[in-house]
Amino acid sequence: MKRLLWYITITIFALFMIFPLLWMISTALKPTNEIFSLTPSFIPENVTFQSFIDVIKMESYRRYLGNSLFVAICSTIISVLLSSLAGYGFSRFYFKGRKRLLHIFLSAQMIPGVILLMPIFFIMTNLKLMDTYLGLILAYVTFSLPFSTWIMTGFYKRIPRELDEAAMIDGASRFKAFVKVVLPLASPGMVSTAIFSFLVAWDEFLFTLTLTSSEEKRTLPYGLYSFMTQYGVEWNNLMAASIIAIIPPLIIFLFLHKYFLRGFTSGALKE
Amino acid sequence: MRRRESLTGLLFILPALLVLCVVVFYPLTWTFWLSLQEKILISPVNDQFVGLAHFQKIFTDANLWKYIWITLVFTISSVAIKVVFGMIGALLLHQNYPGTKVYWSLFTIPWLIPSVVAALIWRWMLHEQFGIINQVLISIGVIDTQIPWLSREFLSLVSVIVVDAWVGLPFMIIVCLAGLKTIPEQWYEAAKVDGANSLQQFSNITLPSMKTILLVMGTLSFIGTFNSFNIIYTMTGGGPINATNTLVIYIYRTAFTQYNFGLASALAVITFMIISIIVIYYRRLLDREGEF
Amino acid sequence: MKKLIYLLFSLMLLLLITACGNEETASEALSPNESKSEDAITSDDQTVEEVTITAWVMGTDDYWRSYHDDLVERFMAEYPHIKVDLDYIPWGEGENQLITSAANKTLPDVSTIAGRWTAQMVAMEVVESLDSYFDSNFSNEFVDAAWNTTQYQDETWGLPVGFTTTGLFYHADWLEEAGFSEPPTTWDKFLEVAKAFTNDGKYGFGLVGDNSMETTMFWAPFLWGNGGDILTEDMSKAIFNSPEGIEALQFYKELYREASPEGSISNRRGDSQNLFLTGAVGMTTVGPWFPKFIEDDAPEIEYGITPYPLKKQPANLGTADHIVMFNTSEKKEAAWTFMEFFTNQENDLKWAKHQGFIPYREANLNDEEITSNEDMAFFLNVAEDAISYPTLPEWPQIDQAIADAIQQALIGTKTAEDALNDAAAIVNELLGN
């Protein structure tokens, strides 16, 4: 009885969560003339993969995809690198003002992008970084860096200090001890920060809207947004394009969700 | 020696700090400075220092309070939905029935959809004539005429709240579930021996153990939702007649449809103050829970 | 860890695929041009210095992309020493992109632009005045109505690249079923027909009421048709809140309340067109590109086109898109060559046939194919009643203020009179009085 109740509740819940996704797939499989219907049906009358083919054939779409991958991967690498370093600094060295500095780091995560948008717009202009990958990457790194640093700090704290000290007694330098001994142990934390950073960059819309002007640099969210044209929206193509856009994060998540959960729970939350 | 130690520590932090300075802290001071300037992109000849004129204008304008109110309603409702349903979802998944894993993935997949895309799909589903939601609701008899979800002031606010909650829910569920898994099974067994029913178990064991997680996630989610741009911009653009005009959207529209960077910066400064209050509260919370 | 390596590998692969895809097409696009330029160098004695100009085109859908890709390819074949870097900007973000790029000095050499934005860009002092580039006869080759939209403060700031007028599309079979023998010509008749169409989940009129300039576009002809205007002749003061204007808005509101879907508040032109195509609304106002959409998406529709119903005088909205050169350009010569090519007689005709816009070159007005096409002929005929928006830098903001007022009146938070008066106050402040 209890089990039945559980199944009913969780199914309803799951249906709510998954419904838009199903509708997305259904729309993507419909031919154009079925899209605008006053009695929309859930199951397409004629299933076609045409919109997927059309979208993949679109040069601009492939470019959005490539740009997003490139920008997201680059900012992920940089963010993981910097936060691994900074997290180590925060967890191992008790210098004056450490706590305050960590607070400052964290509060950086909480400032809405839109507040920084206008000055960044001018700064990027002055640095000649408008409409460049570097400008986007720089912006995206900062969106994930504070939180990533926090996760890493928590992670290092769980690795006994005696380990690096032992390595240093054996004659390794501080940095070497960090790279050879501590870093490998912190790899699950790095994976969580990597996933976090990737998703942040993959999802970002406001800055790509403002900092890019040419199609060559446009990332996916802006690209997909521009499927809304002055004549309306080709929903089947947009949905096909969106489904393809979910694949990269999906792959990452399928492979790495265990690391992510472990990293997140032990780094960000106390057990 | 100690001095050297802290220097090494700073050296590890320095690269990250540098990046944050360039892209966050330096621009932030610039925002403050801009808020004292007349700067309208489309009429560059009028650029000049105007002091607190923008603030004066904003505070005498009744609309600011309306938009703050909309922002708060939007944020608090969305966070409440996320926390309550996130907890419910996690409790549902914290079972060992066959199929739990499948449900787990169904719950988390929406998290991977870019929020712009999520907003576009919902906008499409909520369409008065072509939308599947009206179609479904009519066919099961809940409503008898099509509802223009995004065309009535109150309904459109409700719609963006629900969609924002939907987008944020998976992550909340994942974290809550992870939290539930840390509660030792023995506690429940001990409670059962003492004759506590499920409700008592929930309020005496689950809830107290989850308190920290819920508070931290609630606050984090509050800030995230407060800053939410993509969903509202894509679904309604702040309309109809500013019914979904949150502060973030308001700033963006002032800056990029009126091109009034000075005024928008002044709004940004005010928003920053509001956020700061929340952040200070959050910091206290962390301190009290002994996070550092 | 093994998993991690797989993951990295698959991501790299994905990246590689998209990268290759891009390169392939890029080199494809380049190759005809390259071979041509080699020809040029070997056949001509004097070698011309190669230049590259950047050009933006507003519009990201297939129709616009395919036409402009082809145009640029033909241009580069004809002028091998000029290479054109083309970029497509969504219409919705176009104004934004132009202004922010103007502010940070990253404008392209040339760009297409909506006519209603041109004066604003001129006021930012980034547009090149074109009068020195052509002789006095040049302007006579263009249709006056289109050419005039490029004039501001007695100078020419752009060339027309697209000209449209608007008409009322209706489902002819609905009209017959409802017992009308002819399409509505007056406001009263229009409302009557629209009401007759409205039942059983169907509506009379596909109205646009979202808070964008498309709402102003829909409403303005009602204002003009009632003898009103947006600004005074010298463009110093708002007069859309005149009794005529208030009456026009009240009529628009009545249409909304009585004969349009409630969701029109968030509908744009594209939405109302789709409602028409699926048979959810019986009438809507659209420009000359629409017959082609009907043919493509819903060929079974029996439609008719008729002028905007009138109250006092015939009126419809004429809009022009321009191509402009920015004064930041360092390759003005090449840019002008491109603009001239873009708007030459052949391309005007091609665009008219490709997209259904009406020709902006006098010589094409008598083209056989266009005059013999019934729909085209209609849009050409109503051109004489077409009214364009006033050309002034503040226009985009005026446009927005009017759209907001219309929306407020439609939803009912303000009366038509209050909404227009409030908007007029905003506009008058913008205009400096």
Image (tube, coloured by chain):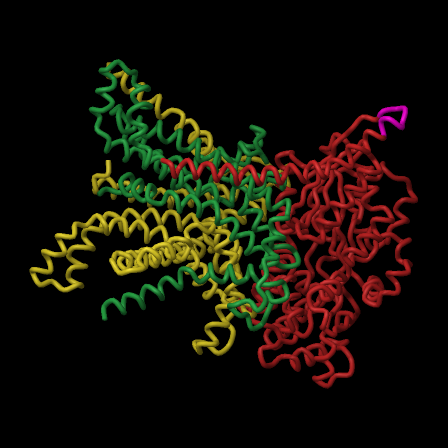
Chain colours: A green, B yellow, C red
In magenta segment, residue C44:
yes
Give the image location of residue B186, x and y in percent.
Answer: 13, 52
Classify residue A163 by image quadrant: top left
Front in this rendered view, residue C266 or C223: C266
Q: Report the side of A183 relative to C165 (left or right).
A: left
Residue depicted at x 50% and y 65% = B126
The quadrant in which the N terminus of chain C is found is top left
Give the image location of residue C353, x and y in percent.
Answer: 81, 57
Q: How many marks?
A: 0
Q: Is residue A119 visible?
A: no
Seen in the picture, residue C66 relative to B14 is either above or below; the reply is below
Seen in the picture, residue C252 relative to B107 is either above or below; the reply is below
What is the magenta range? C40-47
Residue depicted at x 23% and y 50% = B181
Front in this rendered view, residue B18 or C396: B18
Give the image location of residue A255, x and y in percent.
Answer: 39, 44
In magenta segment, residue B198:
no
Give the image location of residue C313, x and y in percent.
Answer: 79, 70
